[in-house]
Image (cartoon, grey):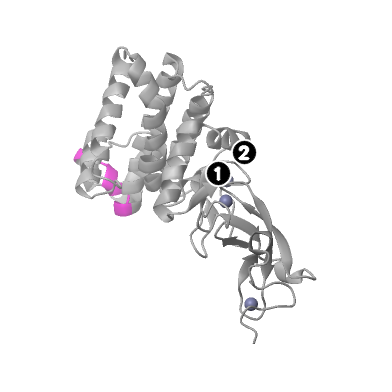
């Protein structure tokens, strides 16, 4: 197996356990994490992060990108042999971190503070103990989630826009369901969806508010459901833009060119008619008597 793949696989090993630990937290009362969950998930996330950076630099600069001292002058074959013998003289995390900051590997420059903070906690945890206070335990469920989604996944999977896609293929399906039901994750996916579109609604599959109605690219950023076959029209009841959803793939196969539609915002339903003459999509109940297109009639007809 290629070295980058090996290191990434190891990073995922820790990231999976970190996520499993994090989502074992019952967030129904919006409490902070327990000390145990905070400790274990912080440790595993930090290890996953360190490995993701190693993989990044091996991919970018070859195995020479992560070694130091006399190892720098060895050939690739010699280094690979040393790697197999667990004898590689690798750069420290601090040095890889500095290299990553200098190369703008992280999405946001502000993340540097968060990265330093995690490293500090991890070092304390390994060498002594870390005393989390109540606020730490509350903030950590958000910070750890952010760290996974915005810091580790982009480096580890080179997935910048759709973190859930990278996670879903690497995580056990039960844990993935738990993750998307974990409120701090749902919140993070809301923010990701909002970056893609101004119109973000509740997904009918996972019920997270992370369905971005982005023309031709409609997608739920939590459960990864692809909505590109759906039609979206403005809701005539609550006036929310493109909030009323219907099955656009099947509407034209209906005898009366009409299919049920539901507003993802106010939950009112209607029947949508697709006019073949002018291509209008009309919510029939809401527009009844208003002279809009309906079966057998187009408002643009003479
Ligand atoms: Zn969804
Ligand atoms: Zn509505
Ligand atoms: Zn028409």
Closer-to-camera residue (141/21) = 141
Q: Mostly what secondary structure, the magenta segment? A: helix
Q: Is residue 182 visible?
A: yes
Query: Is 242 situated left or right of 249 in this image?
Result: left
Q: Tell me where residue 198 appears, x and y as whole percent.
A: 42, 54
- What residue is pinned by disc 1? 168
Outermost residue, right side: 255
Mark-to-mark CA distance, 2 and 1: 7 Å
Mark 2 and mark 1 residues within 8 Å of each other at the beta carbon: yes
Mark 2 nearby-residue class (10 Å; few <14, some 14–19, many ≥20)? few
Q: Does dot 2 land on a helix, a strand or a loop? A: helix
- SS label for mark 1: helix
* Residue 247 pos. (x, y %): 67, 61
**Towards the viewer: 273 or 88:** 273
x, y (%) of residue 299?
63, 78
Magenta highlight on residue 63: yes
Q: Which segment is the magenta one?
A: 60-69
Image point 61% across, 82% down: which residue? 300
Which residue ends up furthest to the front in the rendered image?
289
Residue that mark 2 sits on: 173
Q: Where is the C terminus found, in terms of image quarters?
A: bottom right
Marks 2 and 1, the one that precedes in the sequence: 1
Q: Is residue 132 above or below residue 250?
A: above
At 47% from the left edge and 22% from the top edge, which residue is drawn? 30
Q: Residues within 10 Å of mark 1 (few under 14, many from 20)?
A: some
Q: Is residue 64 a member of the stretch shown in magenta? A: yes
Whole-percent x, y for residue 185 in the image: 47, 36
Residue 157 in sight in this render: no
User: Where on the picture, by quarter, is residue 113?
Assistant: top left
Give the residue at x 64% y 64%: 287
């Amino acid at each position: 197996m290629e070295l980058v793949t090996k290191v990434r696989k190891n990073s995922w090993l820790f990231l999976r356990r970190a996520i499993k630990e994090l989502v074992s937290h019952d967030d129904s009362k919006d409490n902070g994490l327990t000390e145990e969950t905070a400790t274990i998930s912080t440790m595993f996330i930090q290890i996953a992060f360190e490995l993701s950076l190693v993989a990044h630099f091996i991919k970018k600069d070859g195995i020479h990108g992560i070694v130091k001292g006399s190892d720098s002058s060895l050939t690739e074959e010699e280094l690979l042999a040393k790697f197999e013998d667990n004898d590689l003289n690798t750069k420290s995390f601090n040095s890889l971190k500095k290299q990553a900051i200098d190369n703008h590997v992280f999405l946001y420059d502000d993340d540097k503070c968060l990265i330093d903070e995690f490293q500090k906690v991890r070092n304390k945890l390994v060498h002594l103990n870390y005393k989390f206070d109540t606020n730490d335990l509350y903030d950590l469920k958000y910070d750890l989630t952010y760290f996974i989604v915005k810091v580790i996944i982009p480096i580890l999977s080179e997935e910048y826009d759709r973190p859930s896609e990278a996670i879903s293929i690497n995580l056990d399906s039960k844990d993935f369901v738990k993750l998307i039901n974990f409120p701090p994750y749902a919140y993070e996916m809301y923010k990701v969806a909002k970056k893609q579109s101004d119109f973000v609604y509740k997904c009918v599959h996972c019920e997270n508010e992370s369905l971005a109605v982005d023309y031709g690219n409609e997608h739920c950023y939590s459960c990864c459901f692809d909505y590109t076959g759906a039609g979206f029209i403005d809701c005539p009841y609550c006036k929310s833009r493109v909030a009323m959803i219907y099955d656009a793939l099947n509407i034209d196969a209906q005898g009366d060119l009409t299919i049920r539609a539901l507003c993802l915002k106010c939950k009112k339903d209607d029947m949508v008619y697709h006019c073949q003459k002018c291509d209008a999509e009309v919510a029939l109940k809401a527009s009844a008597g208003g002279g809009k297109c309906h079966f057998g009639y187009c408002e643009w007809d003479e």
